[in-house]
Image (cartoon, rainbow, N blue to C red):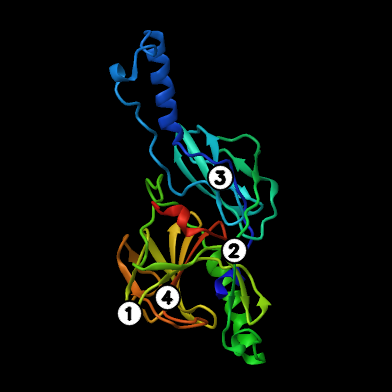
Amino acid sequence: MGPSSFATTASPAVPTHHHPLTHRRLTRRSALLGGLGLLALPASHLGAVPQPPAVWPQASQVPGGIARLSLGPAKARPLAYAGDVPLLVLGDVIEWTALVGIALATAPGEASIMVQDANGGGPRQISYTVVPKQYQEQRLKVSPRTVDLSPPDQARYERERAHLATVMATFSEPLPLASILRMQVPTPGRRSSSFGLRRVFNGQARSPHSGMDIAASTGTPVVAPLPGRVIDTGDYFFNGNTVWLDHGGGLLSMMCHLSAVDVKPGDLLKTGERLGAVGATGRVTGPHLHWGVLLNRAMVDPALFLLA
């Protein structure tokens, strides 16, 4: 699948499975109960201990994953960068969190981001560790012209790659109140190919699979996984008919191989609103949706945004 060819580098952060504010409240509650001598009582006397809510996207500090870095409290949203690429920062005055997409090509080891607080002061560095992950391999037979490109096809691909680089660099204001970015699956169907799969076309290794493939019949509706603005549509050599959505803060969705495109750049979509239909355009072996999620210009695993 072509989209992986366009993936750029990104960075990561410390996994946080509990919302910081909820954790603080539970800690204060525990301290209060301990001071009253209630912690020694059986659980049946106190009732069930409330569990912190799940957060989306889930933290997974591996290549192709997402790191969640706590930036601490601040009166206004801090600015955070991986190199010169701006990062998505969510939260409130009590706790801000940077979400860092980790590119599939990222080598395991130490990494860092830079943070600039809105209330002044010099920039500070926050470090984190990327741990390795082994992805599976898949071998496919496709038309030779899609592997060994002719000069005209190669020229087309280069033009499209340059254009998509500008699309992928889109950065707008984060969605209001978007502290939990749980996505809706954009089309019903079986997940036929997982993110990160190592692809070998006609015996030639290519970039890892950079999205989630969902097998569905041609014409099955495809919808927006989150509220977003359409920032690009087109018919691309590898991706076929494609729609790009901007969800804010450098979080983008890409829907590929569509048989129909029902939106145009500038359209604003709500979660669940139709944008097109499943198809088999571009480099494919059958009808399906290729769904890619981009965070700070890195393709990340869409499953991290789903309930299961």
Q: Which residue is mark 1?
A: 219
Q: Earlier in the sequence, mark 4 or mark 1?
A: 1
Label 1 residue SS? loop
Q: Residue at x 55, y 37 (%)?
A: 71
Asked if the residues shown at circle 1 and circle 2 are in contact, with their CB atoms under 8 angstroms apart, the answer is: no
User: What's under tag 4, amino acid-wise?
Assistant: His
- Distance from disc 4 to disc 1, alpha carbons, whole Å, reads 10 Å
Q: Earlier in the sequence, mark 1 or mark 2?
A: 2
Residue 304 as seen in the image, left or right of residue 81: left
- Distance from disc 2 to disc 3, alpha carbons, whole Å, reads 36 Å
Residue 71 as seen in the image, left or right of residue 217: right
Q: Mark 1: few, some, or many residues within 10 Å (few <14, many ≥20)?
A: some
Asked if the residues shown at circle 4 and circle 3 are in contact, with their CB atoms under 8 angstroms apart, the answer is: no
Q: Earlier in the sequence, mark 2 or mark 4?
A: 2
Label 4 residue SS? strand
Q: Which residue is mark 4?
A: 288
Label 2 residue SS? loop
Q: Is residue 65 above or below residue 77?
A: below
**Which tag is nearer the camera, tag 2 or tag 3?**
2
User: What's under tag 1, amino acid-wise?
Assistant: Gly
Asked if the residues shown at circle 2 and circle 3 are in contact, with their CB atoms under 8 angstroms apart, the answer is: no
Q: Which residue is mark 2?
A: 136
User: What's under tag 3, amino acid-wise?
Assistant: Leu
Residue 132 as seen in the image, left or right of residue 15: right
Q: Earlier in the sequence, mark 3 or mark 1?
A: 3
